[in-house]
Amino acid sequence: MKEKQTRVARRNFLAGAGVVAAAAGTAALTSHTPSLAPLANSTPDAAPADSKGYRISEHVRKYYRTTLV
């Protein structure tokens, strides 16, 4: 009976160690991600009214605001 308890305890320990390692890896990756605040201010300027290309309108600005994390 003691052999079975030892195996279960070892499995629980290894499973717990795996969870701790995954949590530590996630914490390490998220602590080094750069802030996206400078990117929010880098939206292109509005094009002249006679331009047929890309234009920044209010709904596009709203979309940019919603994509910030």
Image (cartoon, rainbow, N blue to C red):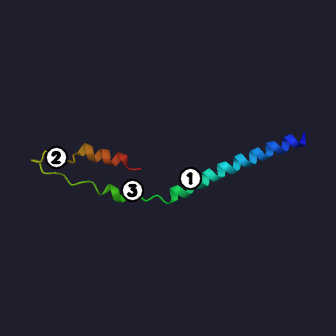
Query: At 16% across and 46% down in the image, what residue appears?
Result: 53
| Mark 2 crowd level (few <14, some 14–19, many ≥20, 10 Å Cα) | few
Query: At 12% across and 48% down in the image, what residue appears?
Result: 51
Query: At 21% across and 46% down in the image, what residue appears?
Result: 57
Chain-order first, disc 3 or disc 1: 1
7 horizontally vs 64: left or right: right
**Position of 32 relative to 12 (above/below):** below
**Position of 8 relative to 17 (above/below):** above
The Cα atoms of the two marked residues, 2 and 1, are separated by 42 Å
- Identity of the residue furthest to the left in this view: 50
Q: Amino acid at mark 2?
A: Gly
The residue that disc 3 covers is 36
41 horizontally vs 47: left or right: right
Point out which mark residue 41 bears.
none
Q: Amino acid at mark 3?
A: Leu
The residue that disc 1 covers is 26
Q: Are the two marked residues, 3 and 1, in contact with CB atoms closer than 8 angstroms?
A: no
The Cα atoms of the two marked residues, 3 and 2, are separated by 26 Å
Q: Amino acid at mark 1?
A: Thr
Q: Are the two marked residues, 3 and 2, in contact with CB atoms closer than 8 angstroms?
A: no
